[in-house]
Amino acid sequence: MLQTLSTASSLWNPSQRSACLEIVEFQRSQLSSLSPCPFYLKFGSKSVQKGRALVSGTFPYACQRPKQYPAGKKPGEYPQNMDLPPVLPKKKKKPYPIPFKEIQKAARKDKKLAERGIEKPLQPPKNGLLVPELIPVAYEVLDAWKLLIKGLAQLLYVIPVYGCSECSEIHVAHSGHNIQDCKGPSSSKRRGLHSWVKGSINDILIPIESYHLYDPFGRRIKHETRFDYDRIPAVVELCIQAGVDIPEYPSRRRTNPIRMIGKKIIDRGGYVEEPKPWRAVDPSSSSIIDLDTCGACERFPPPSPEDVPIIAQETMNAHETVQTGVTKLMKKYTVKACGYCSEVHVGPWGHNAKLCGEFKHQWRDGKHGWQDATVSEVFPPNYVWHVQDPKGPPMRSALKRYYGKAPAVVELCMQAGAQVPRRYKPMMRLDIIVPESEEASLVA
């Protein structure tokens, strides 16, 4: 068809060509109003080699329209400003990460298979075997975790951090802020102002610990036997169960998968005697001391001024690596979290230690309300106020709506000279100019 049109177009006179172009443009406008067709017809003057002769004329050809994205946004772009996740009330259970109807649907499916005596189909790592493609990710996360602790310990010599002695508020600046949002026991006497003290690395990187299990599919931890197990960072325990081998924290590596009917394990390969806890050995004589934040500031010397921006950027990259890697691992490996408190357990089911003291713990006899964990529960971001001028005047409650927030690690590294990742910029509100106190009343 195009060949016929090209041959006929060479015989048209200029008036016929212009009339045809008008008709085509009119038809294009009608089609575009009816349906957004990705292609449109266009005429152009070209010279085409047809056999041995060179034919010149106006030829029609199809062109593709540029792809339009909804609301004018392209993939990978972030909004100009973004609100933080809402603070969940303490007198209420956390929402389920997976919709409850889907949980019930999966439970009914397993129950039907169990009633018919059919084994539950399990894929790694649900059947106790490792996922080979996630083993390098686990080693990468563990190395980034060590680098993150080392970088934060060195940056705390340069960037001051303050923490409230009455609540969990953290502020990264040369002085504490004056925002009256303290929820501590004696906050009413201070009219909501914080009682600032010098902060530590545990204020920046919240220590979320979990019990180390030699066999996650073995015996469950009871309240009476809770002291027979080591407590290590949840990120480290997740890496160990994903394939990282640490001599001080051994883990059982199965070669045959486990078998289950419903919720009952019918073949786990037998029980194996678990090794004794590692904490009986001197911790200073091993390299695993780098996996914990305890005493990190004493282990590393203060950095030189010219090395501060480099350390800040390495720490920022390590933080992103840990968060990305934990997200990948948690898509396969099961991690449980209490729906009422901050307890986390890495394994197919939670433990039976009665240590929950949050909302209505008396009704549960201190037992945790286990549900699937989220990445923010295993590796919490710990949001703090973003300070545009760390050496400037302290923040005030009257201008609270103009301030942004960022994770404590990101804010600390940014003040030390690191580049901020794009996904944190909307919540930091970098494009908003904070007005003076007199101008704030005039802003609509």
Image: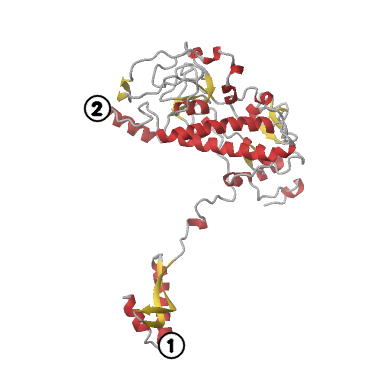
Q: Residue at x 58, y 35 (%)?
A: 381
Q: Residue at x 75, y 47 (%)?
A: 436
In the rendered image, the vertical position of residue 388 relative to residue 18, given as above or below? above
Q: Amino acid at mark 2?
A: Ile
Label 1 element class: helix
Q: Is residue 197 left or right of residue 64?
A: right
**Which residue is more in the foreground, 147 or 37?**
147
Label 2 element class: loop
Q: Position of residue 30 (x, y in %)?
A: 40, 72
Categorize mark 2 by other alpha carbons within 10 Å: few (<14), some (14-19), many (20+): some
Q: Amino acid at mark 1?
A: Pro
Q: Residue furthest front?
A: 52
**Which residue is more in the foreground, 324 or 30?**
324
**For mark 1, what is the residue?**
14
State how far apart marks 2 and 1 are (Cα): 79 Å
Categorize mark 1 by other alpha carbons within 10 Å: few (<14), some (14-19), many (20+): few
Answer whether residue 173 is visible to the viewer in this image.
yes
Q: Position of residue 142 (x, y in %)?
A: 53, 30
Q: Position of residue 358 (x, y in %)?
A: 53, 22
**Which residue is more in the foreground, 278 or 224?**
278
Q: Can you tell which quarter of the image residue 332 is in?
A: top left
Answer whether residue 358 is visible to the viewer in this image.
no
2 or 1: tag closer to the N-terminus: 1
Q: Position of residue 343 (x, y in %)?
A: 51, 24
In which quadrant will I find the N terminus? bottom left
**For mark 2, what is the residue?**
118
In the rendered image, the vertical position of residue 407 relative to residue 440, given as above or below? above
Q: Is residue 141 left or right of residue 254?
A: right
CB-based contact (under 8 Å), mark 2 and mark 1: no
